[in-house]
């Protein structure tokens, strides 16, 4: 098969505090930090025994789909570090190190998924059959020759990663792997947030980007990325409108920022296909 074919923490929060926008930002930042500390990808990827213990009732097809997607993201950050360094794109050591860290995270995710699939069914992990990946979208982007473009593509791939995982995690509700997949997703979300903040600090840049997605805003002019954010503008969860919920002064922007919307396999495939060289 090819690629083509933290509720407990919230329960501790006082309702009055959660209603204040300034307090909400601090609360979410604190929870994100806690999640990140418990979601170190190397701890996940290095323990093959853990993968073996969780090998029952695994949806191999779904895991292979996630793995195929992870290969695309991992290869991007591998090339970003290599070519970005060779082309002197990184304006500082910190910027370069951020990409190195994300590259290492992505490689660990690929390793963990591969081990998990093979533990469930020996040699079941589907090898990548693409000839390569085109992160320039047919030469229309200067992805590895322009720092601003590099950050923009990195943002899209990480934001898309979070939505991809959310769209697939539902199939693991009663599976022990659910915790691991959520842990990986939280690392991806933290990295996406960091890259978004890196884009706001570009020397001479005027782009101001929040650490999370607002409505379906891409903060990127190229329309090729619009599909990656389609559907993020919803302010309804489980049939309930979040805008003004409980009499709170929650506007549409805040309502959409509070949730990441899932994407189906078909939607992800359509978005990513232009990057796959076959």
Image (cartoon, grey):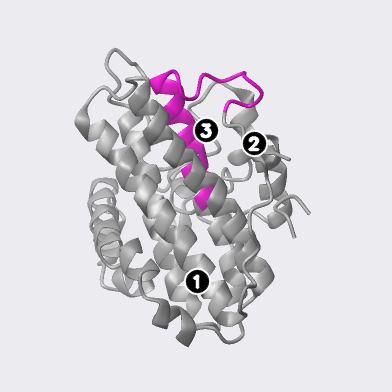
* Residue at image coords 38%, 31%: 209
1 versus 138 height, above or below: below
Residue 95 percent coordinates (x, y): 27, 32
* Segment colored magenta: 136-161
Nearest the eye: 251 or 68: 68
Q: Which residue is mark 2?
A: 275
* Residue at image coords 73%, 40%: 278
Give the class, few, some or many, for how many residues have Cα within 10 Å of label 3's Cα (few <14, many ≥20).
few
Mark sitting on residue 175: none
* Residue at image coords 57%, 87%: 56
Residue 35 percent coordinates (x, y): 30, 64
Asked if the magenta segment contains residue 158, the reply would be yes
Mark sitting on residue 217: 3
Residue 15 percent coordinates (x, y): 29, 65
Residue 108 percent coordinates (x, y): 40, 59
Say what secondary structure mark 2 lies in. Answer: helix
The reply to whether residue 122 is in sight is yes
């Amino acid at each position: 098969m090819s690629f083509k074919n933290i509720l407990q923490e919230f329960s501790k929060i006082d309702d009055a505090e959660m209603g204040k926008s300034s307090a909400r930002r601090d609360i979410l930042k604190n929870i994100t930090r806690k999640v990140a500390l418990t979601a170190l990808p190397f701890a996940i990827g290095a323990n093959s025994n853990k993968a073996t213990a969780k090998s029952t009732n695994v949806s191999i097809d779904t895991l292979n789909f996630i793995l195929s997607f992870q290969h695309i993201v991992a290869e991007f950050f591998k090339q970003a570090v290599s070519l970005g360094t060779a082309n002197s794109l990184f304006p500082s050591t910190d910027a370069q190190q951020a990409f190195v860290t994300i590259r290492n995270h992505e490689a660990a995710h690929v390793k963990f998924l591969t081990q998990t699939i093979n533990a469930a069914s020996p040699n079941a992990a589907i090898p990548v059959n693409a000839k390569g990946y085109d992160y320039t979208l047919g030469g229309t982007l200067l992805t590895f020759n322009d720092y601003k473009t590099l950050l923009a593509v990195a943002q899209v791939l990480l934001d898309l990663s979070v939505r991809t995982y959310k769209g697939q995690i539902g199939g693991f509700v009663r599976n022990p792997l659910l915790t691991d997949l959520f842990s990986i997703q939280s690392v991806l979300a933290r990295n996406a947030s960091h890259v978004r903040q890196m884009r706001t600090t570009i020397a001479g840049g005027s782009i101001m980007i929040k650490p999370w997605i607002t409505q379906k805003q891409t903060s990127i002019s190229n329309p090729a990325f619009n599909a990656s954010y389609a559907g993020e503008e919803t302010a309804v969860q489980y049939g309930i409108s979040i805008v003004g919920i409980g009499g709170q002064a929650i506007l549409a922007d805040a309502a959409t920022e509070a949730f990441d919307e899932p994407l189906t396999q078909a939607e992800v495939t359509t978005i990513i296909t232009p990057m796959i060289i076959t």
